[in-house]
Amino acid sequence: MGDELMMSGKERRWLVELELVVQGKQGLVEAARRVGLGYRQMKRVWRRYREWGAGGLVHRGRGRRSNRGYGAEVREGCLAVYRDRMKGFGPTFAAEKLVEWGVAVVDHETLRRWLVREGMWQRRRKRGPHRQWRQPRARFGELVQLDGSHHDWFGTGERACLMNFVDDATTTTLARMEAEETTAGAMRSLWGWIERYGVPLALYCDGKTVYVTGREPTVAEQLVGEPPLTAFGKACRRLGIEIVRAYSPQAKGRVERSHGVYQDRLVKELRLRGINTIEGANALLDGGFVARLNERFATTPAVAEDAHRPVPPGLDLATVFVFEESRCVANDWTVRYSNRYFQITGPKQGMPRPKARVTMQRRLDGSLHILYRGRELCFREVPPIARVKPTRPVPMAQMASTRAPQRPRPDHPWYRPFSPRALAQRRSGQPDAAPVGEQP
């Protein structure tokens, strides 16, 4: 073994305890208890120590190649596939792809060491905790975090938004690709979550105007005692979902970390499959990508009870996720909405009176509905009404400015010379002198 012997910490503890046994300060039973071994195993360690000394405590496989190690062919094959198809992939995701493609079954830590040795991967420093940790909710569906992730998902330079839902108790996720983080996109995503899991108790989202509003309540809201809500907030209120506002990205850290998983794995999956459209991305998400993520990363909640609620019987979600505005009925039973005119045609029972307020409801599929006191009205679109503007009297000053100029007649007094004598003649009734250039 030489003068120096490389020992692990565990083997060093064995050596210290066995030296106490040699000195007679303790027995093998006490030594086995202190190092955490059984008595029979400790007897075998004691026998090797007596035969080989401290060198007998060193693992006999040290310095040798492991019997379970991978051959050079497997290693070079995995690295070749990584260079050709998975440049930039993390070791964990790359190991999963190698198994999926049938290349080799390699542990992600083994692949990480190979990549680091070849200079194709660098160790990343983990940041320490910045804020106080919050205990996750106990039940699935008790709190669902919602946020949009804006990213260049297709590698074309154009950014799209991934509407991401993450359950606080289990980290179960559900995502949908949209062009922007809009109210309609948030409604469609929440609709998909409800159809799959049920109605959650609360949503945890940031302060974007899609989810919450900072405006003052209107007079109508003040009269009924309702807080100001967005269209998304009104839909959640009808379903009994509480909206909890997060005041920092760290507060909803679970969905923020989920963004990182999607920006790593989804981007590379889209690149491998050649998908560059939002429709194709949604087909991939619904076709098993999200399900595989949940199988890989979802955890078991502290309480097995599911907090999701079913949709109330008879409630159509198409009538919940809508945009509503109030309009006044004209004397001819027409309503104007988005610069379009609609003629109310029925039903005869329960027709709104002129000057009554009706609700214009626009659904996610683009259809338009008119409701009065909770009942749907019949209507048809009519061409824009031609309204004749009343004529106003033209001011005299404007009329004078538009009249053609007129020259005075040749015998006008303006052309006659002025003199005190001529003025005296005119006052006495005598004829004036002839105009200049004319004969008397």
Image (cartoon, grey):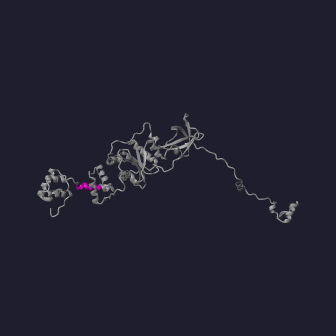
Residue 335 shown left or right of residue 230 in the figure: right
Task: From the image, give the main secondary structure of the stretch colored magenta.
Answer: helix
Q: Position of residue 394 (x, y in %)?
A: 69, 51
Q: Which residues are magenta?
A: 71-80
Image vertical order of residue 406 relative to residue 145, above or below: below
Foreground pick, 393 / 142: 142
Foreground pick, 409 / 432: 432
Please give the count of numbered marks on the rendered protein: 0
Magenta segment includes 84 = no
Residue at the limit of the structure toward the left, as seen here: 51
Q: Quadrant of the N terminus?
A: bottom left
Q: Position of residue 310 (x, y in %)?
A: 40, 39
Residue 242 shown left or right of residue 170 in the figure: right
**Is residue 26 among what the camera can see?**
yes
Q: Position of residue 156 (x, y in %)?
A: 41, 55
Residue 151 shown left or right of residue 101 in the figure: right
Residue 400 shown left or right of residue 283 in the figure: right
Residue at the limit of the structure toward the front, as seen here: 25
Image vertical order of residue 378 relative to residue 216, above or below: above
Image vertical order of residue 227 relative to residue 352, above or below: below
Q: Position of residue 324 (x, y in %)?
A: 50, 44
Identify the residue shown where x is 53% and y is 47%.
218
**Is residue 433 among what the camera can see?**
no
Q: Quadrant of the C terminus?
A: bottom right
Q: Quadrant of residue 139?
A: top left
